[in-house]
Image (cartoon, grey):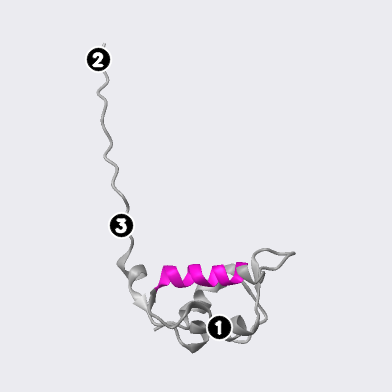
């Protein structure tokens, strides 16, 4: 009978993609929500979600939809409601 060799797995921490970590400058419409300092794309998205949750802008009936207030309407291009899947696309239009 052959003995089984135990192979030790080496776990390496995943490195974040440098493109996501590069600071981007938000324009005036987005800066009203996240501030006007350059931030990585991940932090901008986190701050927008924090703003949405703080102000209760997630639709009660359909949680995938986000209702726009005056500040978010400027980011959403004048649209009253945007799905959470479109959120990142709309944010990307307002960063340099």
Q: Which residue is mark 3?
A: 15
Screen quadrant of the C terminus: bottom left
- Where does the image place residue 80, in percent across and percent down from the top left? 67, 81
* Residue 59 colored in magenta in the image: no
Q: Residue furthest right?
A: 61
Q: Is residue 40 above or below residue 28?
A: above
Disc 2 secondary structure class: loop
* Residue 47 colored in magenta in the image: yes
Q: Which residue is mark 2?
A: 2
Q: How many numbered circles does the render carry?
A: 3
Mark 1 or mark 2, which is nearer the start of the sequence? 2
The residue that appears at 61% across and 69% down in the rendered structure is 54
Q: Nearer the viewer, mark 3 or mark 2?
A: 3
Q: Nearer the viewer, mark 2 or mark 1?
A: 1
Q: Which residue is mark 1?
A: 75
Give the spatial CA distance, label 2 vs label 1.
Answer: 65 Å
Identify the magenta region.
40-53
| Nearer to me, 85 or 30 | 30
- Where does the image place residue 5, in percent across and percent down from the top left? 24, 23
């Amino acid at each position: 009978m052959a003995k089984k060799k135990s192979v030790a797995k080496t776990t390496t921490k995943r490195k974040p993609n440098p493109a996501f970590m590069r600071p981007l400058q938000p324009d005036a419409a987005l800066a009203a929500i996240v501030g006007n300092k350059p931030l990585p794309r991940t932090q901008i998205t986190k701050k927008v979600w924090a703003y949405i949750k703080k102000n209760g802008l997630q639709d009660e009936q359909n949680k995938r939809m986000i209702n726009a207030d005056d500040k978010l309407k400027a980011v959403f291009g004048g649209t009253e409601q945007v799905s959470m899947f479109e959120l990142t696309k709309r944010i990307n239009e307002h960063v340099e």
